[in-house]
Amino acid sequence: MTTPAKVQNNTYHNLTYEEKHGDLKGVALVTFNRPKVLNAISQAMLEELLTVLEHVQKSHVIKVLVLTGAGDKAFIAGADISQFEKMTSKEAAELAKFGQKVFTRLEELPQPTIAAVNGYALGGGCELALSCDFIYAGENAQLGQPEVNLGILPGWGGTQRLSRLVGKPMAKELVFTGKIIYAHEAQRLGIVNKVCHDAQLMEDVMKIAKLILSKGPLAIAQAKRVIEDGYHKELIDALEMEAEAFAKIFDTEDQKEGARAFLAKRPPQFVGR
Ligand code: CO8
């Protein structure tokens, strides 16, 4: 496995990146774009995603990042299996670590991230969706960790993020059997927030993105950080962190604007300062 090469001039071959305009200004859309292999994740696709995430992290314009798959069949059907046949354990370690780094970067973005799961989200595709803040899925979407079918195990966070989300026994059943579940079942398990009609998935995702856009971005970034960082702490320490974040927000223009607008009975104009 080679050291990740920097993506040249933000030219992407394995995904598309679009910043929306008009009433969706502030929303960016990543579309994984290898439909011939159901958007399977290659090393190059991971490198491109990392470049996008570095850009979004620095952006003062992007307030919500949406991720989806090209075509109507798959979000992502997993890591590209064609890499595996001749892969050594050293190369496997490098690829596992690089994917984990990219997915953790996605999880730690200050902006909210939504996975719009439009079809298969399997293996690495499911792990990528689990690294987003939440998942909306089309009714025919199917999710799972079928790695055991290939004689391997999830390597991009699936054993860890899935068990933290659904509990150890359910994660073990899904991982040990490689069972693939439909969106409604995934919703019942708490993996998917909302199941949408397939044709309406992106509309529903943009609707929730627009709602988020209308709120204070600094407050959302702090709330996200506290939820993420507090998750693994003792409650007492996590509450301390929440109080600190709560206090910090009172040094911002947006906090004053939020209170002023409420009292003046007008919508707030948040500026992200
Ligand atoms: N990788 C490469 N090619 C793929 C993948 C994939 N993950 N999934 C589908 N394709 C290709 C197929 O080979 C096929 O190509 P072709 O047209 O050239 O034959 C094309 O996409 C269309 O697929 P199918 O014909 O199989 O479509 P079906 O509708 O019959 O089936 C399925 C759809 C059920 C999704 C089926 O394609 C499938 O089972 N795919 C594999 C799913 C899977 O096992 N995913 C997990 C992969 S392993 C993984 O993600 C590990 C992550 C951690 C890595 C850690 C680093 C080491």
Image (tube, helix red, strand yellow):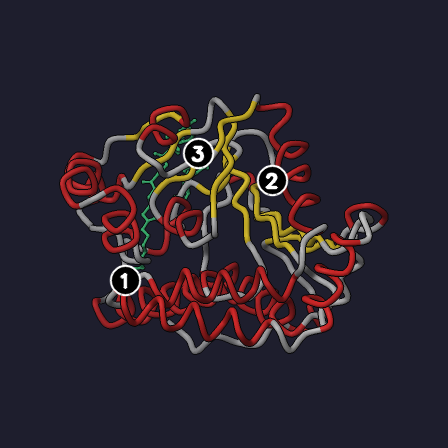
Which element type, helix, strand or loop, lies under badge 2? loop
Neighbourhood count class around disc 3 (C-alpha, 10 Å): few under 14, some 14–19, many 20 upward = many
Measured from the top left, where is residue 26 in percent x and y? 74, 56
Measured from the top left, where is residue 214 in percent x and y? 72, 50
Query: In 3D space, how far apart are the residues under numbered discs 1 and 2 (Cα atoms)?
Result: 27 Å
Q: Specify the amino acid type for callout 1.
A: Met
Q: Quadrant of ligand 1?
A: top left
Q: Earlier in the sequence, mark 3 or mark 1?
A: 1
Please name the residue shown 62% across and 52% down the image.
30
- Name the residue beneath numbered marker 2: 70
User: On the rendered structure, is 235 left or right of 110?
Assistant: left
Measured from the top left, where is residue 221 in percent x and y? 56, 64
Please name the residue shown 49% across and 31% down the image.
194
Measured from the top left, where is residue 6 in percent x and y? 57, 76
Please name the residue shown 57% across and 48% down the image.
67
Q: Specify the amino acid type for callout 3.
A: Tyr
Which element type, helix, strand or loop, lies under badge 1? loop
Please name the residue shown 45% across and 57% down the image.
42
The answer as to whether callout 2 falls within 8 Å of ligand 1 is no
**Image quadrant occupied by the N terminus:** bottom left
Image quadrant where residue 14 sits: bottom right
- Name the residue beneath numbered marker 3: 120
User: On the rendered structure, is 134 left or right of 99?
Assistant: right
Neighbourhood count class around disc 1 (C-alpha, 10 Å): few under 14, some 14–19, many 20 upward = few
Query: In 3D space, how far apart are the residues under numbered discs 3 and 1 (Cα atoms)?
Result: 25 Å
Q: Are marks 3 and 1 in contact (CB under 8 Å)?
A: no
Q: Nearer the viewer, residue 151 or 235?
A: 235
Pair 1/2: label in front: 2
**Image quadrant occupied by the C terminus:** bottom right
